[in-house]
């Protein structure tokens, strides 16, 4: 695989997707689809998903009180109703 430009990581980190894909295509001599696939691979390496985002969301319930405030109940089991 030919050497990728040093500016590529910076472009990916700073959100310059088009410039990054263009640099990949020029360095690799590949198709647009291949360059986009490589961009996504590099993006994933530079922006690892936080561990908290990998956890399944906990069930919750929201309820408006008579005074207009919002009460949130978290960690409810499936089918369980919030207690008053």
Image: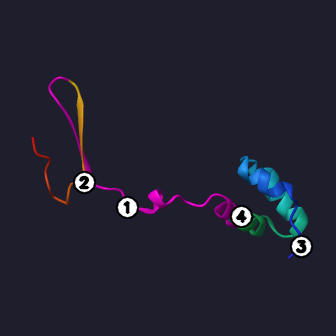
- As for residue 79 lying within the magenta part, the answer is no
Contact, CB < 8 Å: mark 4 with mark 1? no
Residue 31 is situated, as x and y percent measured from the top left of the image, at: 81, 68
Q: Is 77 situated left or right of 45 in this image?
A: left
Start-end of magenta stretch: 41-67
User: Which mark is first along the chain, 1 or 4?
Assistant: 4
Tell me how far mark 2 sits from mark 3, CA to CA.
50 Å
Tell me how far mark 1 sits from mark 3, CA to CA.
39 Å
Query: Which picture quadrant has residue 76?
Result: bottom left
Badge 2, how many Cα within 10 Å: few under 14, some, many 20+? few
User: What residue is drawn where x is 13% and y is 51%?
Assistant: 81
Query: Can you say which quadrant of the picture contains the C terminus?
Result: top left
Residue 69 is situated, as x and y percent measured from the top left of the image, at: 23, 27
- Which residue has dot 4 on it? 42
Residue 78 is situated, as x and y percent measured from the top left of the image, at: 20, 60
Front-lying residue, 77 or 19: 77
- Which residue has dot 3 on it? 2
User: Which mark is first along the chain, 4 or 2?
Assistant: 4
The secondary element bearing badge 4 is classed as: helix
Q: Which numbered marker is on residue 56?
A: 1
Q: Is 54 situated left or right of 68 in this image?
A: right
Contact, CB < 8 Å: mark 1 with mark 3? no
The secondary element bearing badge 2 is classed as: loop
- Which residue has dot 2 on it? 75
Q: Is 2 situated left or right of 81 in this image?
A: right
Badge 1, how many Cα within 10 Å: few under 14, some, many 20+? few
The secondary element bearing badge 3 is classed as: loop
């Amino acid at each position: 695989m030919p050497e990728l430009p040093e500016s590529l990581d910076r472009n990916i980190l700073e959100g310059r997707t088009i410039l990054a894909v263009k640099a990949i295509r020029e360095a690799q001599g590949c198709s647009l689809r291949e360059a986009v696939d490589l961009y996504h691979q590099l993006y994933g390496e530079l922006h690892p998903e936080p561990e908290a985002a990998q956890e399944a969301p906990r069930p919750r319930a929201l309820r408006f009180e008579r005074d207009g405030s919002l009460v949130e109940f978290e960690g409810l089991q499936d089918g369980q109703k919030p207690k008053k």
